[in-house]
Amino acid sequence: MGNEGSISNINLLEGNIEQIQNRTNKTTIANFLLLGFGDHPELQTLLFLAFLTIYMITMVGNLILILLVVADPHLHTPMYFFLANLSCLEMCYTSTLLPRLLFSLWTRDRSISVNGCLVQYYFFGVLLSTECYLLAVMSYDRYLAICKPLHYTFLMNGKFCFWLIAGSWISGLVSNTVITCLELRLSFCGPPEIEHFFCDLAPVLKLSCSNTHPVETATFILASMDTIPTFLLTLICYTCIMTAIVGIPSTTGKKKSFSTCSSHLIVVTIFYGSLITVYLLQDSSQLGELKKAFSVFYTIVTPLLNPLIYSLRNKEVKESRRRAINKCAIFLRVH
């Protein structure tokens, strides 16, 4: 009897210890650690300087592009109205991610609150979805300009352009509001480490000790609605554009038509190429660094390249910049 009682007490004690360990392992956490580029401590200062330079060029370049479009009457066309909106979006987009990354690289403090992480993902998701719609709108604008030139002015009137922009933003807001509201209902457990430099959805969901199926299902449906139709519309528009350009008899006409859409085509290729690569690659330790590198392209490099590509390749933007510089020079000589 004594032995049986001792065995029973030992089993009970082991059961209590196991329950305590389970509760400890499932303790709700208040902060995440964004590991980012922490596995390369010797590169932290170099990465900080590189990303700081990129951030400054991105903000200044996109701001100059917006000011040129607003100030120059020659650029008051649907194409540049959409371009100015894209530049504004890119400034917000890069400001959602880079300041937090720069702070982490400078201070070595990689912690972020759970709520702060969800807020960052919300704005990132809204801006990413809106950019997909806006790039599709710009592709459609170029399609009408090249393939339907006689109807372009009538179709792309000011009211229609406004609703295209408003629809892009509203669509991005609605889908990501639903996803984030579902995310807010989750609880998160340790270890609180996110193998990324920002709060992307997939690595965050891995840390949840709640049922993530509703969030994953909603994300799959809404993300598919945001990306697949816009990507297909962009692809169809450029297929029609290339077909129309090939059919132009003169070489000068072909070059002129292609020059009006080449800048946008480069931006679209970089954005969708890196985005598709990131989300098609399987999650694994071997591909983790590769996915992180491609993530840098569509989150950081694309906003940087947008004003550079349009400034260097677009004749009207270059002429507008030259006129602005001449006006500034005259103003300085007079004063």
Image (tube, rainbow, N blue to C red):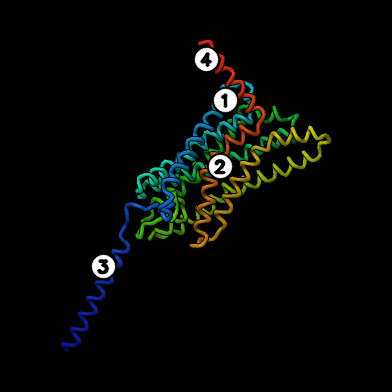
C-beta proximity under 8 Å, tags 2 and 4: no
* Residue labelled with disc 1: 68
Q: Residues within 10 Å of mark 2 (few under 14, many from 20)?
A: many
Viewer can see residue 182: no
> Who's the residue at 30% across and 67% down the image?
22
Quarter that holds the N terminus = bottom left
In the rendered image, the residue lying farthest to the right is: 249
- Residue 332 numbered mark, or none: 4
Return the disc, 2 or 4, that comes first in the chain's sequence.
Answer: 2
* Residue labelled with disc 2: 302
* Residue labelled with disc 3: 20
Provide the secondary structure element on which disc 2 rests.
helix
Residue 260, compared with residue 328, is above or below; it is: below
In the rendered image, the residue lying farthest to the bottom is: 1
Measure the C-alpha gap from mark 3 to mark 1.
Answer: 64 Å
Q: Residues within 10 Å of mark 1 (few under 14, many from 20)?
A: many
Provide the secondary structure element on which disc 3 rests.
helix
* 203 lies left or right of 109: right
Disc 3 marks which amino acid?
Ile
